[in-house]
Every structure is written in structure tokens, then in C-alpha cells.
Image (cartoon, grey):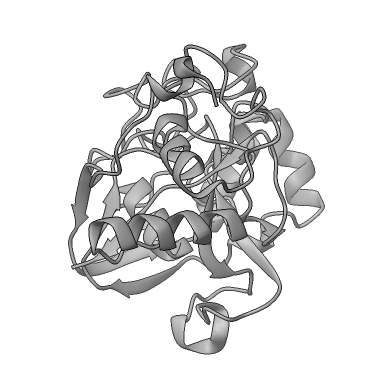
Amino acid sequence: MTPKSTAKLEKAKHPDMVKIPEGDYIIGISDDQINHLVRTEIWATEWYERDMFMSEQPQHTFHLKAFEIAKSPVTNAAYYAFIWETGYRVPKDWIGFHYPDGQDSHPVAGVSKVDCIAYLEWFNQHLHADYRLPSEAEWECAARGGDTRLYPWGEDFDPWRCNTVESGKRGTTNVGEYSPSGDSPFGVMDMAGNVWEWTCSLLQPYPYDPGDGREDLKGRGKFVIRGGSWYYSHKLARATTRESALDNFTSPALGFRLAKNI
């Protein structure tokens, strides 16, 4: 690695965290919300006719224990400190052993869930902490802020509040670039667009039940990813959208953020 690279090395440090209070939260999309989307969004008719909303239903109430979630996704600079110290493999879209110039504060992308766990093991060892990936239920509750909104800011899409394909950025943007207008009611940034985010939850049908094996740390299958990204339409950036991938999957539009028990 070059002197230029070492000049940008960031020490491992605790991220800014947002407390999500304990309480009853609504998860999933309702029939009324689907009807609203069909009336207002061209793409929604096809989704409705092909039953593509089924993975987000039924809408139901879940009692959530209090936890903390990172205000923003893990950045290139933060992930680079891990690469520098451990010699771990770099994301595919990096140039040599370093992320592109000027993207220190962009979310790291091109990381698998396996990579996320490796980062977390290193990070927690450094800080004597117990950070982890959020569950998909925790992620959705943090994004919706305690009500049933479809986007962190409200019921309808606004291209000025997030980085999706409609924004024309053609790549990731600095975390918090759309803050505070794109923040969730809890003040969590980048929950719509920029990069998809890994969760620790296996994809299983709703209702959400953390005791049915979907939160098994040794579970095998496809894991839920949330939030949409710069590469995809806003239809996938809804707070209720559930996509999934195998734990070794990588994409230049997929990153992660940290969570922590209280």
C-alpha cells in the first residue's frame, strides 16, 4: 500500500448510534398502501398482478426490544482500516488496494455478508464491543420511525431525498448527503437508496418471528437485504421492500451498517 493510502487511514472508532426505543411497531405493507401505489405508481400494477408484494405481507405488529443502530452505513474509510490491518480481501470495485479517490465518506460496497462478519469480528476486538448486523425487523422499524410510512420521510417517493437511479448519480454518494431531508423520524440516514444493506435475518415468510430460526446465527440460505440503492429504481427503496442474497454474494450496490444491543 502506498504512502498516499496510509495518509487516509482511519482508526477504528465507535460510530454515531441512534437509539430505537422499545415498543410495538408495524411491519410490512397493507392492502390500502398497495392500492395507493397502484393508483400513483406505474410499476405497481405489474407488481400487484404478479403478487410481488406478497413477501411484504401480511402487515403486522411486532414488539421490538430497544437497540441502537448506526446513523449511517459503514464507510470506505472505516472499512479500509480493517483491510490495512488484516490484509483481508478488498471489494472488487476498489482500485488496487484502495477505494477511489474522494470517496472516503461513501458507503463501502461490494462486500458479502461473510465480509461483514469478518469486519465485525475485527472491529469488536479492537473496541471490546459487541456490534452486529441489524435484524430486518430492527432495520424496518428504524427506517419507518414508528408508523407505517413507505419511505423514511413519508408515504410518497421524492427523488430529492435519496440516491436511487432516478437521481442520476450513477454511483454511491457521501453518507448523509441527503440528510436531514431523507432521514427517518429517528434521525437515521440513508435508509433509502445509496446502497442495499445486509441484515442478519434469513428470508422467511411473514409474520416476522425471531424464534422460528430466521435469526439463527449459523443459519444457511438467503439473507434479507434492505433499502434499495443508487443502481435501482425507487420502487425497491421502500422501507418495506424485502430482497435477499446468499451470504457470499457481492454487488457494487450492497453495503452494511452496524447495530448494537442496549
Q: Position of residue 217 (x, y in %)?
A: 52, 78
Q: Position of residue 139 (x, y in %)?
A: 41, 55
Task: State the count of labels.
Answer: 0
Q: Position of residue 129 (x, y in %)?
A: 25, 63
Q: Quadrant of residue 151?
A: top left
State the residue at coordinates (45%, 81%). 210
For this orientation, the residue located farthest to the bottom is: 212
Quarter of the rendering occupied by the C terminus: bottom left
- Between residue 245 and residue 87, name the one nearer to us: 87
Figure check: 245 above or below 64: above
- Between residue 68 and residue 132, name the one nearer to us: 132
Residue 176 visible, this angle: yes
Residue 133 visible, this angle: no
- Between residue 144 and residue 133, name the one nearer to us: 133
- Between residue 51 and residue 10, name the one nearer to us: 10
Figure check: 208 above or below 177: below
Quarter of the rendering occupied by the N terminus: top right
State the residue at coordinates (76%, 57%). 51
State the residue at coordinates (39%, 44%). 149
Figure check: 34 above or below 41: below
Q: Position of residue 154 (x, y in %)?
A: 37, 35
State the residue at coordinates (49%, 27%). 157
